[in-house]
Image (spheres, rainbow, N blue to C red):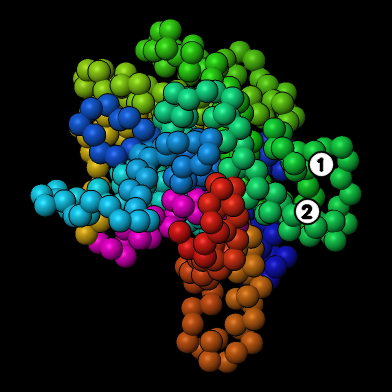
Amino acid sequence: MSWEQYGQGQYGQGYGYGDQGQAYVPPPQQYGSPQPYAQPQPQPYPQQHGAYGAYGDYGAYGQQQAPSAESTAQLPQVEPETEPEPEVPSGPGPGPDPNPEPAPPPAARSGGRDRYFDTLRAVALVRVVTYHTFGWAWAGMVFPSMGIMFGLAGTLMAKSLERPALKVVKSRIRRLLPPFWFWGLFVVVAMLIHGWMPGWQIVYWIVPLGDPPGNAWGEQAWEILWYLRTYLWFVLLSPLLLKVFRLAPVPVLLGSLAPIVVFQFLWQPPDNRFGTGLLDLATYLFCWVLGFAHRDGVLARLKPAAVVVLSLAALAYGGWYALAHQAEYGTYDLDDIPLAQAFWSAGFVTLLMYSKARLNVDFAGLARFRRLDRLVSVFNARAVTIYLWHELALILAVPLVDQFWKVPAFETYLPLESQWFMFGIGWVLIALFVLACGWVEDVAGRKRPRLLP
């Protein structure tokens, strides 16, 4: 497979709506997957994981970050905050406690993170990379990654907003933008070298309140930015959204599906940055508000029968709409059908979060599998890096595999024609990007840069 073949191949599928010919229109987005928790509690979840979501106490995409001067608590999302380590006295002090408390179990020593939400975020990232490699239309139905990420992010945001709203919003933005700028520098320079000349819209490469512009050469890389744009708008709107939600939690939660219904049947948003942004916000509004309901304990108080029935009804309607309108959209891929995406994600994410809120489901036992637990930790701490750089990794995998064909032994013994081989090479390159670029997330979180968290 050549570089040119890759450019128009399946790796570019997955994000956005509308014609990809126009640089500013977000590419077919992958609603369903990057980037990204509260300590298991018997009571309603005090914190939350943020799908690559609320960045305040976690990284962009909800990954947990160490407390900073402006953020005294870590969110769980996804992750409960990490409790600060006790200070070690620098001088003489009282002797050891004659009656020390027993050592905490392994799960408690993992920084207070909720492994259930951590694992959801890690799986969501894997699903995003898998979808962009193979382009499986059914992947969004198996695991709607982006809906899950927005739901976790909403919980983290509600937790963070227990502090002054302005500080929370500034913290989220601070954690998001430096990794975005660092990644964008390479993409913008590469597009300039390949003949791109931007206009005033280049400001969206500084603050992605709209889809950053670009040329067709770099489309494969920048098409994923719809998620950052949508997340950023949710962060800015959350102080108001949370106040409205708390006035009438259940009606507001159910009503959060109304905008996507209106856009589908009554008024079509314009086919531009503004319209695309509205459509994405409407598609995932329910998931974000569901995060509020989880954090405030509203979800845990709902009757199981009502939650299960309504969730299954949403899944049924979303799945039916996607399958029944294949001729209209040319596929049943949820990423290309906003209404189906909204209802399927609503039902799926509700069941996942209700299991946590009502049944206190957790994966604390994951700590017994040290390597797997470590991998989940790295995915969460480097969620933004993985999400931003994974498309470039898949792009670079193509010419790299082309070079393998020049080595007779590789041509004979390696499955160079297999997409699974390409998938493996892509993950090797993603790992290299994590090592080379992940430290930017530490800097954004005001932490000491590390090769690996």
Return the residue found at the far front: 92
The foreground one among 373 and 195 is 373
Instruction: Please name the residue that numbered disc 2 is placed on.
Output: 188
From the viewer's perspective, tell me whether residue 103 is left or right of residue 289: left
From the viewer's perspective, tell me whether residue 220 is left or right of residue 262: right
Question: Which type of secondary structure does the marked residue at label 1 adopt?
Answer: helix
| Residue 388 magenta | yes
Residue 157 x, y percent position in the rendering: 47, 29
User: Contact, CB < 8 Å: mark 2 with mark 1?
Assistant: yes
Question: Which type of secondary structure does the marked residue at label 2 adopt?
Answer: helix
Query: Which stretch did the figure color magenta?
Result: 369-390
The foreground one among 201 and 451 is 451
Query: For mark 1, does the 10 Å Cα neighbourhood hold few (<14), some (14 to 19), or many (20 or more) residues?
Result: some
In this view, 1 is above or below 115: below
Going by the numbered disc 2, the residue's amino acid type is Val
Going by the numbered disc 1, the residue's amino acid type is Ile
| Residue 406 magenta | no
Whole-Å distance between the Cαs marked 2 and 1? Answer: 9 Å
Residue 154 x, y percent position in the rendering: 46, 29
From the viewer's perspective, tell me whether residue 24 is left or right of residue 299: right
Residue 327 x, y percent position in the rendering: 56, 35
- Residue at image point 45% right, 59% down: 453
Residue 324 x, y percent position in the rendering: 47, 30
- Residue at image point 37% right, 56% down: 90
Instruction: Please name the residue that numbered disc 1 is placed on.
Output: 202
Mark 2 or mark 1, earlier in chain: 2
Please identify the quadrant where the N terminus is shown. bottom right
Q: Is residue 341 visible?
A: yes
- Residue at image point 60% right, 82% down: 404
